[in-house]
Image (cartoon, rainbow, N blue to C red):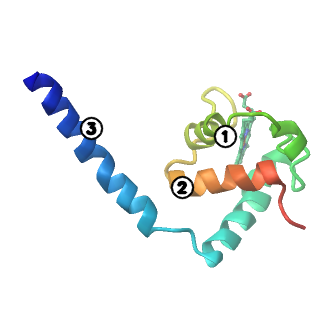
């Protein structure tokens, strides 16, 4: 019982700051436009400037339809070891990557 409580305390202590953090760091419009540029320029250098694919696979809404956004976010955060897909965790927050997945699945506004 004691063990369960301790575990619960760790879980609660571990999640609360993250939730607070997520709420207090909404992505600003400026950051959204920076992220869109990053997707087109940096991701686009491998996935194609229009996301139609190149060295990396196409990332258009029709290609990503039905894909689990969490898995796509993980693919971006951790990259694909042994392939040219780099991990973006050092450069982007999880929240930013989730926003990018939404952007890709919805289509980049022209
Ligand atoms: C240096 C080249 C390169 C860059 C830069 C790059 N990627 Fe990739 N990416 C790849 C390759 C190659 C793969 C395929 C990996 C594999 O074979 O599993 C891939 C895979 C992916 C996947 C998984 C696709 C799927 O269908 O499962 C996603 C999502 C993705 N990239 C998004 C991004 C995003 C977003 C960026 C920019 C933040 C980015 N990539 C930048 C080369 C790149």
Query: Helix, strand or loop at disc 1?
Result: helix
Judge from the rendering whether residue 62 lies leftward or rightward of residue 35; answer left or right.
Answer: right
Task: State which quadrant residue 59 falls in.
Answer: top right
Whether ligand 1 has any atom under 8 Å from the Cβ at mark 3 is answered as no
Task: State which quadrant residue 66 falls in.
Answer: top right
Judge from the rendering whether residue 25 lies leftward or rightward of residue 37; answer left or right.
Answer: left
Image region (quadrant) for ligand 1:
top right
Question: Considering only vertical position in the picture, is 106 above or below 29?
Answer: above
Write the residue at 36% across / 53% down: 18
> Mark 3 highlights which residue?
11
> Does residue 26 show up?
yes
> Mark 2 or mark 1, which has the lower sequence index?
1
> Mark 2 highlights which residue?
95
Write the residue at 67% across / 64% down: 35
Question: Considering only vertical position in the picture, is 78 above or below 32?
Answer: above
> Does residue 92 show up?
no
Query: For mark 1, does the 10 Å Cα neighbourhood hold few (<14), some (14 to 19), or many (20 or more) residues?
Result: some
> Mark 1 highlights which residue?
69
Do the numbered discs 1 and 3 sit on residues whose CB atoms are within 8 Å? no
Quarter of the image where the N terminus is located: top left
> Mark 3 or mark 2, which has the lower sequence index?
3
Image location (x, y in percent) of residue 17: 31, 55
> Mark 1 or mark 3, which has the lower sequence index?
3
- Distance CA(mark 2)–CA(mark 1): 12 Å
Image location (x, y in percent) of residue 49: 87, 56
Instruction: Please tell me how many numbered marks the rendered image carries.
Output: 3
Quarter of the image where the C terminus is located: bottom right
Query: Helix, strand or loop at disc 3?
Result: helix
Image location (x, y in percent) of residue 54: 88, 41
Label ID, residue 80: none
């Amino acid at each position: 019982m004691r063990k369960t409580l301790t575990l619960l305390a760790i879980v609660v202590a571990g999640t609360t700051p993250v939730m607070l953090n997520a709420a207090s760091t909404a992505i600003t419009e400026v950051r959204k436009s920076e992220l869109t540029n990053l997707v087109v320029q940096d991701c686009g250098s491998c996935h194609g400037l229009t996301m139609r694919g190149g060295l990396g696979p196409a990332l258009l809404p029709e290609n990503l339809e039905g894909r689990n956004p969490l898995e796509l976010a993980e693919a971006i955060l951790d990259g694909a070891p042994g392939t040219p897909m780099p991990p973006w965790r050092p450069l982007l927050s999880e929240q930013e990557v989730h926003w990018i997945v939404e952007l890709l699945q919805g289509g980049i506004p022209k």
